[in-house]
Amino acid sequence: MRGHCYAVASGKGGVGKTTTAVNTATELAGRGYDVVVVDADLAMTNLGRVVGVDHEPTLHDVLAGDAALEAAIHADGEFAVVPGTDDIGKIRDADPAELRRVIKRLQTAFEVVIVDTGAGVDHETMVGCGLADDVVLVTTPDETAVTDTKKSREMVEKVDGDVLGVVVTRTPDAAAATSAADELRVEMLGAAPEAPEVVGDEPVVTTAPDSAVAAAYSDIAERLAVAVDTAGTAAADEGAVGDD
């Protein structure tokens, strides 16, 4: 088995990258997929806080060679989590190059691996994007955010990554989301409206399942599920060649 890896990336912090990773993971797990989310934003980790997980050892310990990957996987929730740390010393000691080994090994154990990357185009972000089967860009319609995300798209292309599309968050209307996707020249996977009254640290698909935001992430997860299933079918077909 080889799981499908998505890297969730953005050019600017605070646009809803981790929110997108967590909500789509929750939805995919609810559809029966075995999912793990990796906090690969090595300098500014927040996945553990968002999903309420306080787990040791962390991804940073694994990347520093101080812990086994299996020990860093928190598997008690709807989906598994490999959290990071806020410890400056451990952040310094973590080797981003080891992400390759981590992601490859997780793909042997999970159907879907979601890598929550750091904002911008630093080295560890591009490592994650280059290893992923598909990259999901996240941006708001804000001009600065779109401009920065365009740089991320260009860098993903330079590391031979494949951009599946963009999730546009905090959208005032459909036209703003479409405009952002058009400017990025990528397919729009979905648009989550501005809704501060329901969006918090918990997955909105769980806390406010009837909201427009939850409906948007449900639709986005369905798009990702189709890509996972399509890739799995293609792999099975390749494996069948010459069987007779």
Image (cartoon, rainbow, N blue to C red):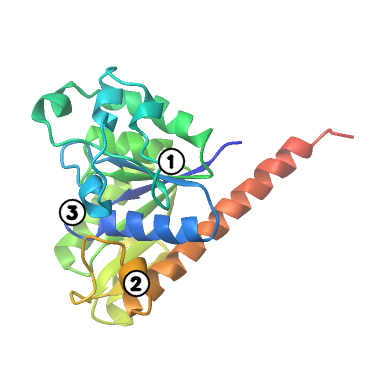
**Viewer-nearest residue: 47 or 122:** 47
Tell me, for residue 176, which label it has, or none.
none
User: Dividing the picture into quarters, in which one does residue 219 lie?
Assistant: bottom left
Q: Which residue is mark 1?
A: 132
Q: Residues within 10 Å of mark 1 (few under 14, many from 20)?
A: many
Q: Are marks 3 and 1 in contact (CB under 8 Å)?
A: no
Percent across and percent down for residue 60 are 24, 28
Residue 174 as seen in the image, left or right of residue 187: left
Residue 76 vertical placement versus 208 (above, below): above
Residue at 57 percent across and 37 percent down: it is 2
User: Label 3 neighbourhood size at 10 Å, few (<14), some (14-19), many (20+)?
Assistant: many
Q: Quadrant of residue 179?
A: bottom left
Figure quadrant of the N terminus: top right
Sooner in the amino-acid sequence: mark 3 or mark 2: 3
Residue type indicated by callout 2: Ala
The residue type indicated by label 1 comes to Ala
**Mark 3 and mark 1: span between their CA atoms?**
20 Å
Give above or below for 88 relative to 221.
above
Q: CA distance from mark 3 to mark 2?
A: 17 Å
Q: Which mark is residue 191?
A: 2
